[in-house]
Each structure stands twice: as C-alpha cells, then as structure tokens.
Image: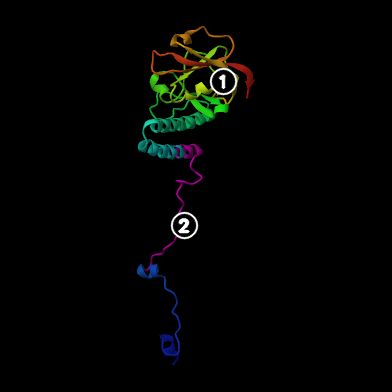
Amino acid sequence: MRAAADRGGPFGRTDPEPRNWMRASAPGIAFRCHPVESSPVGSDAARPRERRRALSWVAAASLGLGLWFTGGGAYLYTKTALTQLLLHHAWKETQANRTPVKPWPGADTYPIARLLAPAHDVDLVVLAGAAKPMLALGPGYHEGSALPGQPGDTVVSAPRDTHFRFLRQLAAGDELIVEIATGQRMHYRVKGPMIAAAEALLQPRLAAPTLTLVAGDPPDTPRYIVVATADGATT
C-alpha cells in the first residue's frame, strides 16, 4: 500500500526530488549562473560632457522639426533659436575648458563672449569674426577692435532683422552686459542710438572701454548703431 502511495494513487502522492534539468541534459557538466553586468551605456560612468552634448543634440533635433514644418518669419525665428541653442552649449564648454570650443564639427567660428540686455530679455552668444556667413549664425565680434573690458571700442554687429532686432528698443541708460570666457562680466550703459554709414566704424579707438553694437543688412546701407560706455562695474 505504501509503495502504491509513493507511486501516486487514490491515497496520496509524494513529490519526487526536484531535478536539475541542466545537469540531466548534460551529465558530468557543471552549470554556473552569474549575474549579468550592467551596460556602462547610460550609467553614471558616462561623462557629464557627453551627456550634455547628447541632450543638446536631442533638443536641436526637436527644434529642427519645428524648422521643417514652419515657414516665413517662423522659419527664420526657429532657425535663429536652434543656432543659439548650440552656441550656448559651446559657450558653456568654452568656459569650463578655458579654450575655444566650436559649436559643431566643421564650424568656421567659435563663441568669444556673451551679450545680455536684461531689460529686454536678450541673451546672445557672440562669435569670433564678423564675416557675413558668421553673422547669419549670431552676433559677430569685429577682429581688430578692443576685446571686451579692454581700453578702446569693442564692436559687435549682427543683422537688424534677427539677432539685433532688439536694438531699436534700447534707450539711454539701459544696461548691457558682456560676459567673457573667464566668467567675468563687464557692465555698460547705453548712451543712445544713431544712424551712420559703415565707414563710421573705422573711427579711432577710444580710450575708455566702449561697446558699439551695429545692426545692418544688406551691405552698403546705413547702419543702426548703439553706443554704450562702461560704467566701471564688473561681476
């Protein structure tokens, strides 16, 4: 009766000892299981700079979709916003590394400063050089003029219908701020606007630190110029 119960039957059943199916399928071979190592991709091992770059390109791609589906003024605005996003990312890396960083592979220029007009919610990255292709990307620093914060006149130009559209809103006494790669900020006060020919930019360099913003496009047309003088404050 007991043997029948062990084999199974109406009086009960004794469960057999669990079998190791891997050992049964291959006698004499020992199987060992090890935990799978996590992939370094996406973990804390990734460098912060690579992570920031990836996030910037994702954001740029999102803006690019908006650029694809818009037109006219919206097209121009989206293109400008996309470019400034990449330039701001390059500017942060420039400040972190204390060396110029190009905004994308093959770029002919790099960020040299940052221009802010707090009262008008303006925050722009200034590029090295003022050639026309560069001005399509952002405000350009005129090489040969004084470096920001140095004695003399610092000249920055940009198209009047995009980056320097805000110039016509500036009034005497408005604050302008120029940030350089070290993080230091120079503060300027607007003296006032004027309309002048492009040749006016060739004036002798001034002794006091001065910031001249020039809005003009197309070529050979009068320029809308805003002059600001340093107020002596740095942060």
Q: Nearer the viewer, residue 34 or 216?
A: 216
Determine whether, in the image, residue 189 is placed left or right of residue 55.
Answer: right
- The relative height of residue 179 versus residue 1 in the rendered view (above or below) is above
Residue under pointer 1: 171
Q: Please indicate, yes or no, whether residue 211 appears anywhere in the rendered image.
A: no
Q: Nearer the viewer, residue 72 or 69?
A: 72
Determine whether, in the image, residue 146 is placed left or right of residue 219.
Answer: right
- The relative height of residue 149 versus residue 125 in the rendered view (above or below) is above
Residue in the picture at 45% in, 55% down: 36
Q: Residue furthest right?
A: 233
Residue 56, image quadrant: top left
User: How far across and down, in percent of the image, does residue 166 sit?
Assistant: 50, 24
Element carrying mark 2: loop
Checking the image for residue 115, the label placed there is: none
- The relative height of residue 200 versus residue 36 in the rendered view (above or below) is above
User: How far across and down, in percent of the image, does residue 188 sit?
Assistant: 59, 19
Q: Does residue 49 belong to the magenta stretch?
A: yes
Element carrying mark 1: loop
Checking the image for residue 35, the label placed there is: 2
Q: Main secondary structure of the magenta part?
A: loop
Mark pair 1, 2: CA separation: 67 Å
Q: Does residue 146 belong to the magenta stretch?
A: no
Residue in the picture at 56% in, 20% down: 171
Q: Earlier in the sequence, mark 1 or mark 2?
A: 2
Quadrant in the picture for the N terminus:
bottom left
What residue type is disc 2 on?
Pro
Quadrant in the picture for the C terminus:
top right
What residue type is disc 1 on?
Ala
Provide the residue span drawn in magenta. Answer: 27-54
Density class for disc 2 (Cα within 10 Å; few <14, some 14-19, many ≥20) is few
User: How far across and down, in percent of the image, does residue 146 sit?
Assistant: 52, 14
